[in-house]
Amino acid sequence: MSGVRVLIGTRKGAFVATADGTRQRWDVSGPHFGGWEIYHLKGSPADPNRLYASQSSSWFGQIIQRSSDGGTTWETVGNKFAYDGPTGTHQWYDGTPHPWEFARVWHLEPSLGDPDTVYAGVEDAAIFRSTDGGHSWQELPGLRTHGSASAWQPGAGGMCLHTILLDPGRPGRIFVAISAAGAFRSDDGGGLWQPINRGLRSEQIPNPTAEVGHCVHRIAMHRSRPGVLFMQKHWDVMRSDDGGESWREVSGNLPTDFGFPIDVHAHEPETIYVVPIKSDSEHYPPDGKLRVYRSRTGGHDWEALTNGLPQRHCYVNVLRDAMAVDTLDPCGVYVGTTGGQVYASADAGNRWAPIVEHLPSVVSVEVQTLP
Amino acid sequence: MIRVVLPAHLRTLTGVSGEVKVDVEGPVTQRAVLDALEVCYPMLRGTIRDQVTHQRRAFVRFFACEQDLSHEPPDSPLPEAVAAGAEPFLVIGAMAGG
């Protein structure tokens, strides 16, 4: 029987939860790398036993861990993330120039076809690539040296490149998102980049429709239709039908259009999920009720999913990388909270139950569907 | 043989418990000890000092013989007691909660 493996990154270590295809009983292992912040773990689509993990600490810096047996054992690989050439400056919070400084890896995106190739999105914003299984890392400097880069600025969590989407239908096309610069696209494998923020509107910047400066929180796509993108922005849920050339708002009837994660159903490209959060200053669900919202129409019309989720006194957040879907039928949906719960739905969001509770604050959740 | 005490996070990373012992040829300096440590435990590269500049990471300090050696030049000799193996060289994570 097929199964799933849920990779959970937390502020104090990594956890791995596994279940068979019913997704009713879970075995949880961990903490792996106890005491370290695990921003992200992700498995290779080409080899599900190949996992990568970003392990970091404000004291001791960045470590990259790699597993070749599905997370049973791990080895440290390369952790030298050196910007390629002069680093220049971006804007600091007060608008003054600030030099680029590497802080950590936020997101690891393994190649769709080669287990030894993996991309890393880092703070301060840049994208790196390894083609030797993580032993060495080379920056793709065309992004950081884009002409707009001196105007990029950090979001509250730092100036992080947190989203990397590899287009399965068009090799060489890569989408990334940076807080708070916006979304960018490369069509040549990461050499040249262009901002793709037309249609975004952000009242928090001097020119609300500027080419860059938007705090994009997350972008998602469906593999069968990579030209259609969905975005959760600082405020606003957005959609693009032309590979990011233009965006339109699809927040519709959401109770608030602020939030962090967004994801797409594995088998229904027009079914999307978000977790509305009260506001940019109050990072918890409205009314103390944790509600995942689902749209079956690609936006605009949303329904609250509450069955099995806490509906009183709940003041957790779901961070940008802490939602994932599996590819079983029915599609499973997973969210991790800053309160240390990971909830799973084995029926596309209709009913939810916790996989595990009382973990350290959850930073990221990824799911592998296993044969 | 130089004795080195690592902080808990780095003991976890290296998989060691207790002190680490490294051989240093030539003058026993901060740089020589860290070089030897990183040869024995390559996963420590970048965790104590920057891989490019070799500057000590901001939240890391070096103590030995009840002295704070964090701001000593990296090529200054360490105390004789450290060089003789009588006292350990301590790598310390700056005290903070979380």
Image (cartoon, coloured by chain):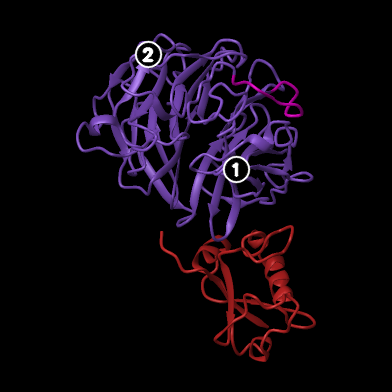
Chain colours: A purple, B red
Res B63 quadrant in image: bottom right
| Side of A52 where A146 appears, left or right | right
Determine if marks 2 and 1 fall on one subunit. yes
The N terminus of chain A sits in image quarter: top left
**Residue A340 percent coordinates (x, y):** 34, 44
Q: Which residues are magenta?
A: A186-197
Res B37 quadrant in image: bottom right
Q: Is residue A143 above or below residue A300?
A: below
Q: Chain of mark 2?
A: A
Which amino acid, mark 1?
Ser
Within-10-Å neighbours for mark 2: few <14, some 14–19, many 20+: some
Query: In this figure, which residue is indicated by the disc labeled 2?
Result: A252
Distance from disc 2 to disc 1, alpha carbons, whole Å, reads: 44 Å
Q: Secondary structure at mark 2?
A: loop
Asked whether residue A191 is drawn in magenta, I would say yes
**Residue A76 percent coordinates (x, y):** 62, 53
**Residue A40 percent coordinates (x, y):** 52, 41
Report the mark closest to the observer, 2 or 1: 2
Which amino acid, mark 2?
Gly
* Closer to the camera in the image, B35 or A329: B35
Does the residue at mark 2 contact the one at mark 1 (Cβ under 8 Å)?
A: no
Query: In this figure, which residue is indicated by the disc labeled 1?
Result: A68
| Side of B28 where A125 appears, left or right | left
The rendered magenta stretch, by its main secondary structure, is classed as loop
Q: Is residue A227 above or below residue A361?
A: above
**Residue A148 percent coordinates (x, y):** 69, 31
Q: Secondary structure at mark 1?
A: loop
Res A118 quadrant in image: top right
Q: Disc 2 or 1, which lies upstream in sequence?
A: 1
Q: Is residue A327 above or below residue A280?
A: above
Residue A325 at least partly seen = no
